[in-house]
Each structure stands twice: as structure tokens, then as C-alpha cells.
Amino acid sequence: MNDIKKIIDRILTGPEYPEKEYVPGRHTYADVYGMAAGLLEQFSSKEMAGEPVCICTEDRGIIAATLLASLVGGPVYILPYSLSPQVIQETREVMKFRYAVADSTVELPEGVPGVRPERGTWMSRRSDGARDINSNFFQLFTGGSTGKPKVWQKTPMNLFAEAAYQAERYSYAATDLVAATVPPYHIYGLLYSVMAPFLASASVLAGMYVFPHEIVSVLGSNPVTILVSMPVHYRVLNGAGINAPHLRLAFSSTGPLDPGDALAFYRKTGVGPEEGYGSTETGGVACRSTATGRDLLEPFEFLEWKINHDRLCVKSPFISPDVPVDEHGFFMTGDRVALVGKNRFTLLGREDGVVKVGGKRVDLNDVQDKIKRIAEIRDAFLFSMQGRKGRGADIVAVIEADLDEIEVRQILSRVLEQYAQPRRIRIVNKMPSTSAGKYDHEAIMKLFDAEKD
């Protein structure tokens, strides 16, 4: 793995190709460095010392500028897991930020001014003049199903070293053009569609393409060489007429990629999607490519890992300093795994009831407790089933109530985020239970046996 200080020295010297477009039609590399310099000036007052600033934009050029500005001593920036007004307000309640770097497309909380970076003059620097590589400089939020979002501190070592590793591993180059269907405020989108292209002097398209016709169009009408996408979008592309003559790499993350969708994409493009496994708090952990015969998860070379009572434990330079580790530096994840051969593993499921839905993590125990507190509902049992439309999982609920399904869904829509709402629901007069008074899992599963999605 590259020496992080050498990487930072190279970054802080200034752009290698100033007039090259980082975001075509919007920002050159000189523009990004100029915006970083402007942010340093805009947030340089003494009253801002130590205050975080929230990032409320999907503009990858502006996000890259905030990374540079924080790296050389600007404020610590917060990146929410969504740019919805509700999530930004929750983030403000947790972090007490007073300012946001924003554009006109995002609704900000009352009293929070949106600052758009002004163009300044970048002064060449070295790593010895930058923030300590192990200090907090960026904060990422992961979505919870209830309550406040969870914040994870990230250091320059965490983010820049990982982005450099991935850029080197997959040979990102200045000739590459990246298209993304995943937002840049997701850790995967941040690393693969903002930071890795930036470190390689590559270009990344401004849009976020989510509908089938948009994805097909952008691949066919632009010389896109790298696609950064997610399982739900590979699913909608299954059967679509894709013409991507320049494509050489395709990534997938945020949840398990259906092997059939991966194979269909491979047959259309000749490119097997590289499926990443990891989390915001751990960074990247492993990869696989089922379409090209690599069915098992292969840990990245820098990673130390072991299995403890079926739980995956990892030691990595990319782990957030907020993560609890043992005396040897290992973090026990919530994933159950099985060793296959000497250095591969397969996932068996979650230990802690957390599932991913559309790339967002949902704690089923929290959702279940919240549903049980609804006056019209007597009892609720939640679990997850493998999604059959490109999702990591579907949330499934058995509800004991004197209501019909439409009424239940209307109530749940008022108390749960959309992604945390159960996709499949069964209403019962009495919750199936064993003679010991526990939930009868076998009987509950039978309620869904005949269901067809």
C-alpha cells in the first residue's frame, strides 16, 4: 500500500493537470483546488474554530474541495447519509453545526446559511503542513431506522489511504471517465466516484443516474470506462439493451448483488461487476465477482482478519477511530461468516439484527420496538428475507392488530423512514407462538411460503 504521506504531499502540491476537467462541463482540477482555497478563507474566522460544517450538496467537485480544505486545517466537515430535510435536521441536532456548504437544490434548516465556495488561490503545501493523518477531519453518518444517525469519525489515513489503495488496485487512470448511480454522500460513492478519480486525475460525470433509461443512455452516449453502481440498478438493467463500448470496470456495493443480474450485465458488456463488501466504520474489507467465477469473498491484501465464534473480526488502517477494538486491534463485526479454503469466506447473515435495504442500514430490533409502541398494534415481529429485486434484503413483518394492511401501512408511513418500512406484511389476529410463549418462527415463515413477489 502506498505511503500515505507521499500521497498527501502529491495532493497538496496542487493539480497535476490544472485545466483537465474533473467534472466535465462544471469543474476543472484548478477549480477544485481554487474552491478549497476559498473554503479555507471563508471559514477562517476565530469564531469558527473547532466548529463542524455540514456538506449539503451532491456536487462531487465541491465535496472534493471540502476534503482538501479539511486536510490542510480547515473545519471538520460532516457528510449526512441523505440530503433530505429530515436527515439534515437530525444531523444538526446531533452536531450543532451553524453553517453548511450547499447549493440551491437542498433545503436547509431554518437559520443555517448555505455557503457556496468562492474561488481562491491554492498555496502549494506539503504533508508536514497538513492535519495529522490520524486526526479527525471528516465525519460520516450512517442511517438508523429510529432516533439519531450514528456518526463515524474518519481520518486522512482512513479515507485518503483507502481511496489510493482502490485507485491503484483497479488501475484508475487520467484517461478514465466515471459514471455513478450511487450518491457521493455514501461512503462507497465517496471513495469510488469522488476520491479515487480525483487521486488518479480522472474525470467523473456530474449526474447521478438512477433510472434504467438514464443509465443506458449515459453508457451509450459517453466514453464511460468505469461504472459505480449498486444492486438495485443492476437489477433494472437486467434485460435492458446496453451499449457500453468503452467500459472496462463496473463496481457494485451497498448490499449483495444477485448473481443472475451480475451475469446478465457481463453478457451484455463483457465486464463482470466487482462487488465490494465493507462498511462505513470498517472501510473496504473484501471483494468478489460472481459473473467471472470468483464466487467467494476475497479479503483485501492490507487486511488482517479472523473468525471468532462465526463472527468476522478485522484489523485495518481504514477503521474509524470510533470503532471498539480488542487488545490486538481487531474489531468484531456484526456479520457471521464461514471460512472456505485458506483465505476466502462467505457471509452467513447478521448477528445484530441490522440489515441493508437499498444501501441503508436498518436495525430490525429498533423498528420492531417502534411499531410495538403504536397504540393500534398489539404485537409485531420483524425479520428479513432475501430481496428478489436487487435489494440486499426485504423487511418482513407480522402484525397483530384489528386493522387491514392498508391501514397498517398508512400508520407506519407516518412513523418510519420509507426505507425502514416493511415491504411484506401479514396481519394476524393472534401472533403465532410456541408453548413456551416465544414467537413460533416456523409458523411465521409459513405465512409467507406462498407469496410471490
Image: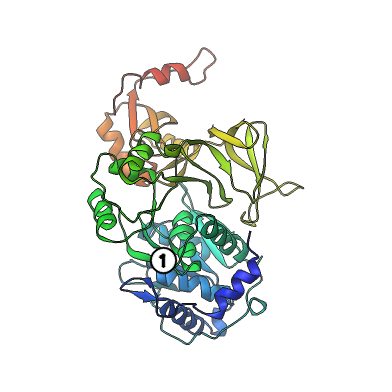
Q: Secondary structure at mark 1?
A: loop
Foreground pick, 179 / 379: 179
Q: Inspect this view and state whether residue 431 appears.
A: no
Which quadrant of the figure contains the C terminus?
top left
- The structure residue drawn at horizontal position 60% and vertical position 36%, both measured from the top left corner, is 344
Foreground pick, 53 / 2: 2
Badge 1 amino acid: Thr
> Residue 367 appears at what percent x and percent y?
44, 39
Query: Residue 221 occupies which quadrant of the picture?
Result: bottom left
> Residue 105 appears at what percent x and percent y?
30, 67
> Residue 312 appears at what percent x and percent y?
62, 38
- The structure residue drawn at horizontal position 45% and vertical position 35%, both measured from the top left corner, is 368
Query: Residue 341 occupies which quadrant of the picture?
Result: top right
Q: Would you call the spot at circle 1 few (<14 residues within 10 Å), some (14-19), or many (20 or more)? A: few
Residue reaching furthest top?
435
Which quadrant of the figure contains the N terminus?
bottom right
Q: Is residue 272 left or right of residue 338?
A: left
| Residue position for label 1 | 175
Q: Is residue 242 above or below residue 13?
A: above
Residue reaching furthest right?
327
Q: Is residue 344 left or right of residue 170?
A: right
Q: What colouring style does the render use? A: rainbow
Foreground pick, 88 / 164: 164
- The structure residue drawn at horizontal position 65% and vertical position 56%, both measured from the top left corner, is 317
- The structure residue drawn at horizontal position 36% and vertical position 42%, both measured from the top left corner, is 266
> Residue 140 appears at what percent x and percent y?
51, 59
Q: Is residue 296 above or below residue 330?
A: above
Q: Inspect this view and state whether residue 56 appears.
A: yes
Q: Is residue 443 above or below residue 381?
A: above
